[in-house]
Image (cartoon, rainbow, N blue to C red):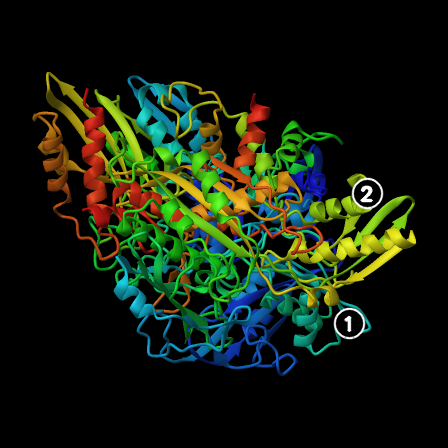
Amino acid sequence: MNRVEARVKVTGLATYAAEYPVEGVTYAYPVQSRIAKGRVTRVDASRALTMPGVLGVLSVEDPPELAEDADGELALFQSRDVAYRGQLIAVAVADTYENARAAADAVRVSYEPADHDVGLRADHPGLYRPEVVNPDYPADTERGDVEAGLAEAAATIDVTYTTPVEHNNPMEPHAALALWDGDGRLLVYDSTQGTSSDRETIAKTLGLPASHVRVVSRHVGGGFGCKGSTRPHAVLAALAARAVGRPVKVALTRQQMFDVTGYRTPTIQRLRLGADADGRLTALEHVAYEQSSTLVEFAEQTATPARVMYATPALRTAHRLVRLDVATPSWMRAPGECPGMYALESAMDELAYAAGLDPVELRVRNDPETEPESGLPFSSRNLVGCLREGARRFGWDRRDPEPGVRREGEWLVGTGVAASSYPARRRPSKAAATVRDGDFHVQVAAADIGTGARTALTRIAAETLGVAPDRVHVELGDSDLPDAPVAGGSMGTASWGSAVVRACEELMKNGSEGHADTTGEIATDSRLARHAFGAQFAEVRVSEVTGEVRVSRLLGVFAAGHIVDAKLARSQFIGGMTMGLGMALMEETHTDEEFGGFLRRDLAQYHVPACADVQHIEVVWLDEQDERLNPMGSKGIGEIGIVGTAAAIGNAVHHATGLRVRNLPITPAKILMARF
Amino acid sequence: MKTFEYARAASPSDAVRRSGPGVMYLGGGTNLVDLMRLGVAQPDHLVDVSRLPLDAIEQAGDRLRIGAAVRNSDLAADPLVRARYPMLARAVLSGASGQVRNMATVAGNLLQRTRCAYFQDVSRPCNKRRPGSGCPAIDGDHENLAVLGRSDACVATHPSDMAVALAALDAEVHVTGPGGDRIIPMPGLHRLPGDAPERDTVLEPGDLITAVELPPPPPGASAYRKVRERASFAFALVSIAAVLDVRDGAVAGCRVALGGVAHAPWRAGRAEQAIIGGPATGEAFLAAAEAELDEARPLPRNAFKVPLARNLIVRTLEELTP
Amino acid sequence: MDITLQVNGVPRAVDVDPRMSLLDLLRERLGLIGAKKGCDHGQCGACTVLIDGRRANSCLALAVAVDGSEVTTVEGLAGGDGLHPLQEAFIEHDAFQCGYCTPGQLCSAAGMLGEPGPSAVTDDVLVDPDLTPAEIRERMSGNLCRCGAYVNIVSAISEVAR
């Protein structure tokens, strides 16, 4: 169905965080560190404070009161230590945006710099094994004898892939509008993927009871993970508003987003694979090297897909982390799975060539009965079905595996395939449903960050209640509503939807209202391996003159349980694949080794796909019945679309040219330098 | 953004009269407003010249006179430009976006500044922005920067597509200024960085571009091609404007200009000289391209631009060969 | 400085700071939040409005420099209480997800449909080409959409262009 909030979005009436009309609003603009490591010795705001309209400057010279155990990225102006270039070290508040920004520019900061280290290397002496990787997986696993498996293999590969720093770059920059009332209660309009958790974090950081904080986030201009945890701008707005005694708006610039709102860690990934003469794996080893900041340990679960994907008698996965003088990495669409599957599915393609097998067939032959690492049965697993259906639709049987032989003028043409997978989890959520004037009102503190949560929950409620969707009204995006987990980890619809179903069921029983909390229900979920799967096929054209790569065709076939709404699901799969295309061909933030921080911090230099890059994307899904997930039988679809796209494109580039570019993104520079 | 005084010029001479230290002319604003917001440009006075009556495209005999305030999109959509200088229309259309082209003026396009990451970030050194502060791009992020005509002080590239076509067309830039009126040939408006990279062009303080005049189009077939990893709305890695006139199997005329390789649109004079009078063959084009690129001094991460420029010259000229 | 604009057909006289962009004027002073700030540098298109009928990045226009202009934002695109055909088509084709780029996409598409002439992908620049999907993709590339709704945006615009 059409999005329930479609009309306000196409008429410009939907309100995002910075857009609520507030009487007497003022503006805050942050000052950022110009060193990557060291100390702030002095913040001189004397000139800024004399400028027109300026209401105040906050900095470490007069540290605002915050909880002592605040998260390192949120503990603003508490320490003189600088952890990374771009860190927020002061803020100017003024009556207009122009005056605030000019005042921030006039704040003079003196530093005592120290030598910094911002470069991730696989031989970095600071590498260590984290206790766990996100969200709570063991860092290392080992089963069977990898060395023996490799020794006995008929075909082996030992390859290293790298992925760069990538930035989520939702179209709406992070913004917050903070208002304190006379009783010390705080209202924050924030761009967040979860109002319940944002309220908890803001309250904890400010040392307030959660009941004194309300977060409202009716519309969010995309997040893709970087609005999944509270970011410093929200704390900044609250502190500034408290200091000047007026409402304060903070709208980060696109450049500031690169510095303080998280990013996908760069990775270095070594894959060693062996297969016997029939193409059955004898060993699989996946070791990932990645970074975090000195402030917070963020250990991405990059090698975990290898624990799920293929049957092998010997499996080893490992993660090594190094703490650098950089901002803390954070979640970006399919964290772990996306870069990890890029490397694993590229390596599987290389193994297919080494073993002389078709890449689809290699994957089919190694499809496991149970989850390889845990031994758990799958709730459902239709990877083989996706591969077969995709191969049929894509015309894979006509594919000549020989690389570098198809040509249309200067353009070399190739096709590639990769598998996708993403966990299908759910978390406890509350929800309420009531009847009023014959219509049904559903409340849950969910977030609609563009996923279509309002629409999906409307359908879920309508189907449970047995009424038309237009009689259901879903209210979300407000921490005063029943507590709900973040829109992230492809868990939103599964988590909120479970609670909405239960609330609606109770309403049907008593005829007036229902209140649900799924904590108990989820605690008794059986132990199973629950994942969505998919197969992606790409056709690319590579210019032998310029090295440009254009993706002429993408096909995604997914098995993701019951699809709640076909129209919105198709859009979301396509959106994930579009972002995957960007990851494959253009997305890269450059780390500045000399000065620290990032370079190319804007949308003219950090390229995300433009309309012209997306030619033809087709998405289909298998009809998958899985009763052991949640009341809807659904698996999350927000992330699986991006998993595998980059590998499929990279494998197609190899098929087109014979070149393996193992360092994303696959740019004309890399193709030309490899060919000439 | 620093505060400034804003005034609208009544005429070109009024604009020049208002010029002086701390004064900048505002055209479409697509680069200047951008740079002011970044703190890279900090004028005390803005003199708005965007509404001066310099927005006509007129035939002057066999020449074409394009007003300095003509919007990029109007230039590309102009029937005379499309018919007589299709390469110029194509170059303009390959730059920026529809919205930006609706705002940006001809003069502003010529005078836009490099998109080098260091130049645009006032918290980092840059010889072009702060003379003598150093060029971190040389040992840092220079993948998109210059391979030809660079200096030890600066490896910036000029980002315009239009200027590359104008350089190939032998355009003339008409300027008025405190020192009177003058005409600057293209190429020639833009400088190589040398030891004064803060100066992008040969314009003197207070100079105002009033028009660009095109001589009759050179005979032969022409093309503009732009290479970029994003399919649109991206600056060129390398671009080429080329004209080739082949008569009886021999090259009677040839023009080649490259974008994305230097501090100025790069007219490939050596390649042209090597090609003119010889056979129109791939071998001849390759030899000419290599002669031109012989003086390239690539850095580690932009070395790909040399084979890219070579391939582009050869392929474009081959495609222009009847 | 005192300036006067026609915004969605309504004359608006305002005293503005010369540093203020048209985008900030619309959003912070005139209560028109449809035009979005995505990059503030003309690199994303979310702020696209029509200035004197032509699509433009309102973040790159100083308010003082557009004194006297007619500005149309997404709020005024339909010219009444109904929806513009592009707005209808965007809804039916699900041409947006988060909605943040949508007002800019709509204003850009409305402006684009009034721009004849070739584009960078037109084979012959002498011809005013049909608006094929490839032409629409190139002409709409100044409007980034991170949700990746391009496929549906192009089909929505194609329907209206027909």
Question: Can residue B46 be seen in this snapshot?
Answer: no
Q: The residue tagged with tag 2: helix, strand or loop?
A: loop
As drawn, A195 above or below B14: below
Question: Can residue A412 be seen in this snapshot?
Answer: yes
Q: Which mark is residue A466?
A: 2
Q: Give left or right: position of B22 versus A47.
A: left
Residue type highlighted by circle 2: Gly
As drawn, A334 above or below B57: below
The residue most toward the left is B278
Residue type highlighted by circle 1: His
Q: The residue tagged with tag 1: helix, strand or loop?
A: helix
- Closer to viewer: mark 1 or mark 2: 2
Q: Tell which circle, 1 or 2, labels the residue nearer the N-terminal end.
A: 1
Q: Give left or right: position of A368 versus A172.
A: left
Residue B95 found in image quarter? top left
Contact between labelled residues 2 and 1, with CB atoms less than 8 Å apart: no
Where residue A39 appears, as percent x and y from the top left, is: 46, 81
Q: CA distance from mark 1 to mark 2?
A: 38 Å
As drawn, A42 above or below A226: below
Where residue A53 appears, as percent x and y from the top left, is: 64, 63
| Label 2 crowd (10 A; few <14 / some 14-19 / many >=20) | few
Which quarter shows the C terminus of chain B?
A: top left
Q: Give left or right: position of A38 versus A169.
A: left
Q: Which mark is residue A212?
A: 1
Q: Nearer the viewer, residue B3 or A107?
A: A107
| Label 1 crowd (10 A; few <14 / some 14-19 / many >=20) | some
Residue B101 found in image quarter? top left
Where residue B169 appears, as percent x and y from the top left, is: 25, 29
